[in-house]
Image (cartoon, rainbow, N blue to C red):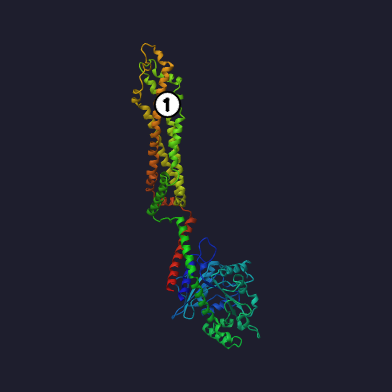
Amino acid sequence: MENLISLVNKLQRACTALGDHGEESALPTLWDALPAIAVVGGQSSGKSSVLESIVGKDFLPRGAGIVTRRPLVLQLHRIDKGREYAEFMHLPRKRFTDFATVRKEISDETDRETGRTKQISSVPIHLSIYSPNVVNLTLIDLPGLTKVAVEGQQESIVQDIENMVRSFIEKPNCIILAISPANQDLATSDAIKISREVDPKGERTFGVLTKIDLMDKGTDAVDILEGRSYKLRFPWIGVVNRSQADINKSVDMIAARRREREYFANSPNYKHLSTRMGSEHLGKMLSKHLETVIKSRIPGLQSLINKTIAELEAELSRLGKPIASDAGGKLYMIMEICRTFDQIFREHLDGVRSGGDKIYSVFDNQLPAALKRLQFDKHLSMDNVRKLITEADGYQPHLIAPEQGYRRLIESSLLTIKGPAEAAVDAVHSLLKDLVHKAIGETMELKQYPTLRVEVGNAATESLDRMRDESKKAALQLVDMECGYLTVEYFRKLPQDIEKGGNPTHSIFDRYNDSYLRRIGVNVLSYVNMVCASLRNSIPKSVVYCQVREAKRGLLDHFFTDLGKKESKQLSKLLDEDPAIMQRRSNLGKRLELYRSAQQEIDAVAWSK
């Protein structure tokens, strides 16, 4: 069973090393779940003497006023033989064999945390004592409860100490060791009063009665020790500590324990209770009870640790990976984040995620509607046909067919298609930009690094701008191609009419009559509609090829090229994570390491049982 207490000792030290000592925190706390014995008592209640009797050594600071100003986690380790020694967690690998120096180090370490003021701190001091004269036990010595602030202390110190004590003992896993002097009315005991508040049924409170030998003549503490005055679940234990004269004379603690045994064994009032009185019995009883409580808590601890590990891993996953320290690692990290973004962007285009379908809507709805609004028939009105045919003939009217007039009419009609073509390019460009912004928002890793997020967004937008410009050139070239070379076969298949080509018997000006011009307009309109139908299919192909396909293939190619030229400092600027997030990730990582270590330790103990 001894390894159960050792297990809790290890976990308590690890908790304190990570700043987990039961205070309110946004991080999960293991400290509160660990069973512990908190020593509570008022000033001058004999609290320090009880602890020193259990240890068998003088090691606690003494003096007037509030001496204990930080919690002292006292871990006792029984050794079979060898010289007694002590170790502080804040001074690893340094052994103290002179316990007077232990007392001085406790005072010095308290001052390091609180300054040379008389204020208090909830950050514990960890002290381990190895001795053949102790039982395996862990106690937390808390500042003594007081009613009045001494000189140099704030008036709030009284309430501050009470709040600190309450924060420890209100935890359901805390065993309360309530120290009360027998020579004072139990009803006024500070320890009993605060213990009753958090443990009204006395189910986890051990009552210790000190200074029994200092009671007035004719009085005794039998009613208290037998549980009639104030009943607790566990029997009261009386102790007889060294007197101040004994302390001043440095009376040996072992001798003091012997005198304590003799006092109870020879006292007529307490002889029948002597087997469960004294500091030695107190230490053994507390050790046994602590082991029992720890053993009963192991399943709950395992459940808590497993649940917390899952929660910590989930949050660390949400926060993302830590930043690499070397340039190569940073470059790889940026590339991986960009690839993730690129993959999400492609998924939008491919229909895995929403948004890509809007591009098809441009080709299926917007472009046809824009082409339809061109109204070529109005452009080929009688007046406009006459005007262009006449202008094309110049000073010499056409002889057979007004070819130049046809070309001008067709070209002027087809050039109007450039507007819808450019609008389709711009519409797809706008949709691609929207998908870039969506993909950036859905790339969790980019949320960590604001500068990288902006740079990736800018680089993607610049690429899309270049692709838009190329796409516009290609789309307009399609229109120019149709203007530059007409499909002759179309006109060869038109029915030949002597009036169309000009009747030599008619006046040359008859060639510009309404019927003739109307027929030209109809022919041109038919041809333009044919070309328009063809462009309706070829423009989307050009847009997809120049914009959508290129965006899928190399949206960040230019960014990657520039990235490879950057030095480590420039890469670091891209990975400018919020320091608060970096700190939280570090804290969570350390906390996760603690819980995983605790999981292994507890599982090992559980299996051994």
> What residue sits right under mark 1 in the picture?
413
Say how many tags the image has. 1
> 262 or 429: which is nearer to us?
429
**Amino acid type, label 1:** Ser
Work out whether 453 lies above or below 40. above
Q: Residue at x 45, y 36 (%)?
A: 365
Quick check: 100 left or right of 522? right
Residue 499 is situated, as x and y percent measured from the top left of the image, at 38, 16
The answer to whether any part of residue 456 appears in the image is: yes
Quick check: 64 left or right of 386? right
Work out whether 148 lies above or below 316. below
The answer to whether any part of residue 42 appears in the image is: no
> 231 or 239: which is nearer to us?
231
Image quadrant holding the C terminus, namely bottom left
Work out whether 174 lies above or below 383. below
Q: Quadrant of residue 552?
A: top left
Q: Residue at x 53, y 62 (%)?
A: 25
Dot 1 alpha-carbon crowd within 10 angstroms: few under 14, some 14 to 19, many 20 or more: many
Residue 17 is situated, as x and y percent measured from the top left of the image, at 48, 66
Residue 354 is situated, as x and y percent measured from the top left of the image, at 45, 45
> 421 or 522: which is nearer to us?
522
- Circle 1 sits in a helix, a strand or a loop, which is it? helix
